[in-house]
Image: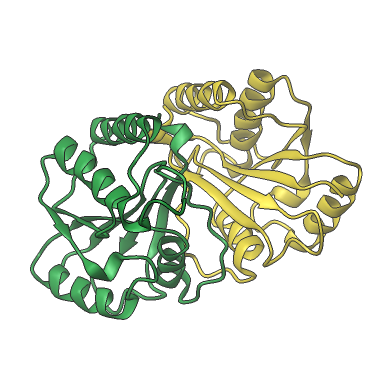
Chain colours: A yellow, B green
Amino acid sequence: MAPLNLYLIRHGIATERNENIDDFERSLTPEGLKKTRDIAQKLHKLGLKFDLLQTSPLLRARQTAEIFANTFSAPLEISELLAPEGDFRNWIRWLLTWQEQGHNSLGIVGHEPDLSAWAELLIFGEARGSLVLKKAGIAGIHIPEEGLPVGNSLLFFLIPPKLLS
Amino acid sequence: MAPLNLYLIRHGIATERNENIDDFERSLTPEGLKKTRDIAQKLHKLGLKFDLLQTSPLLRARQTAEIFANTFSAPLEISELLAPEGDFRNWIRWLLTWQEQGHNSLGIVGHEPDLSAWAELLIFGEARGSLVLKKAGIAGIHIPEEGLPVGNSLLFFLIPPKLLS
């Protein structure tokens, strides 16, 4: 297997929760769209690449992932495993299969507190709420070639959006 | 006590180790000086502040800290506790006293693998080599108002130098 860089991307700023709109359908605000575009472009200039962008099915995540997929000319797929209260166990199973196919750069777009918990599970083997991942923030994790990724991966960056927008 | 932002800054690129120079006296290369200046200026524009910069006594760390102290108009002090194989236990003791005085932003300049191990001790209570801190890279850690910082702090950014230079 090849080593793999995994980028965990939190969706951008979305409209507030309210009783008149299904949480599934909350969209990015104009500010959220602009910041997300700025961030994707900055990361593109820095040389990041994605073999695939995978996103939660919720609208605010899909919109964020579409911006990244367009900026990086990368394929985009929706995964139910990345919905809120996502399915880490089955997602890891999917990841191992995907990594075995020789891919080496994956972006996933989803929600808190799942994404930072997943990052902690990968780097420390335990989630304790010690990482701050803001909206449109991104965590970069190096997943090793050998062995299981949980507890064996490295965090190489954790970037708040204000640094890139 | 006030909450405290701690910035762990690894020294910039220095001349290679060789038999003719004491490790204590290795200096930043021209590239190391330039990158470190660029990074300090970028962080200054982003609104970071330092009440104090503390540095390892080694030349490459002192040069890095001087660039930050000048850019941020912050006082600079040398601490033996930050030398390679530094003294985390006594540094934490110092930090608690300093925090009690009402300060809220500290930069420390030092060496690997100490700095990333200290970051892990603060956020996870355990050092396992899971954070990548490059030369002139910086980790931002939020230390809580209450309780002991070890195992109770939050990582809010981890920035490789190429993102800022």
Q: Is residue A102 visible?
A: yes
Determine whether A94 is above or below B144 in the image. above
- Return the residue nearer the eye: A129 or A151: A151
Q: Which residue: 37% across, 32% down?
A: B35
- Return the residue nearer the eye: B34 or A19: B34
Query: As drawn, is B30 to the left or to the right of B63?
Result: right
Q: Is residue B1 visible?
A: no
Q: Which residue: 27% across, 51% down?
A: B59
Query: As drawn, is A148 to the left or to the right of A100?
Result: left
Q: Residue A116: x and y, percent?
A: 55, 56
Which residue is at the far front?
B20
Q: Residue A108: x and y, percent?
A: 68, 42
- The quarter holding residue A67 reads top right
Query: As drawn, is B133 to the left or to the right of A22?
Result: left
Q: Residue A109: x and y, percent?
A: 64, 40
- The quarter holding residue B125 reads bottom left
Q: Which residue: 43% across, 30% down?
A: A164
- Return the residue nearer the eye: B37 or A2: B37
Determine whether B75 is above or below B39 in the image. below
Q: Which residue: 54% across, 57% down?
A: A113
Q: Quadrant of the C terminus of chain A?
A: top left
- The quarter holding residue B55 reads bottom left
Q: Residue B145: x and y, percent?
A: 23, 69
Q: How many marks?
A: 0
